[in-house]
Image (tube, grey):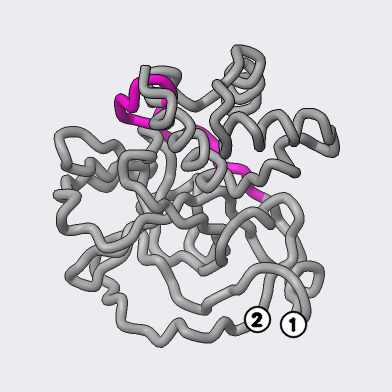
Amino acid sequence: MDEEAVKQRVKELFLYYKETLNSFSKGDAALQKRLSTQINGETRLSIQTFLSIIDRYKDVSLDWLLKGEEPMIKHHDSKPYGESLPTYTVAAEDIVSYEKGKPYFDVPFKMGYDFPFNDNTSNPDYLIDFKPFNKCDFWCNCSGYSMYPTIASGDFVAMQIVRDFHLIVNNEIYGFVLKNGLRTIKRAKLHNNVFTLTPDNKDYEPQEVPADDVLCVYRVIGAVKVF
């Protein structure tokens, strides 16, 4: 086992989960010091360290952590299509803020394939402060019916940037921006460098999109119905 490579993957893991040694250690100074010495220094990684990482990140593949074999996150092929997404109904005045929260862009992700991605999204319209989804990177809204009833037209969705396509978890819901300017939200599965994008509404057909045609991917971590 290439221990330096394993240490590098541990660092990648921390970046992916937006973790720091301090947050991982939860105030345990001795643990933080041990992790720092092992991950950033020449001390060998201990079994205790491996067990603490595996226990914290149960979706991380041990084959990836030890040997670098993709994917990093275990695939859950048994997850059924149409599995519910965390969804809340809230009043707009309870979550809209101009002082704290994550940016909201009044830009719809079309739950289809006919909406061009050519809007000016450099400045958010306002912020959304909603604790269950505050780990997201930004919010936008949805239009269309292909993901109904999981996501309805007009719902606000909390989006999290996916920095590596190989971290896609099969059958979870993602927002895609394609290089031709189109964007859509679907359940995704990556195989042989091709995405299969599947709607929850059975009146719509799955589509296949080569990974090379994809510009950006965002994980949908939840939806809010605003009134």
Residue displayed at 74% across by 34% down:
33
Asked whether residue 71 is drawn in magenta, I would say yes
Q: State if disc 1 and disc 2 touch (CB < 8 Å).
A: yes
Q: Main secondary structure of the magenta part?
A: loop
Residue pointed to by mark 2: 126
Residue pointed to by mark 1: 98
Find numbered disc 1 in the image and state the secondary structure of the residue it sits on: loop
Residue displayed at 74% across by 60% down:
130
Q: CA distance from mark 2 to mark 1?
A: 6 Å
Q: Amino acid at mark 2?
A: Tyr
Span colored in magenta:
65-87
In the rendered image, the quadrant that contains the C terminus is bottom right
Quarter of the view holding residue 25: top right
Q: Position of residue 184 (x, y in %)?
A: 33, 60
Residue 79 visible from this viewpoint: no
Q: Amino acid at mark 1?
A: Tyr
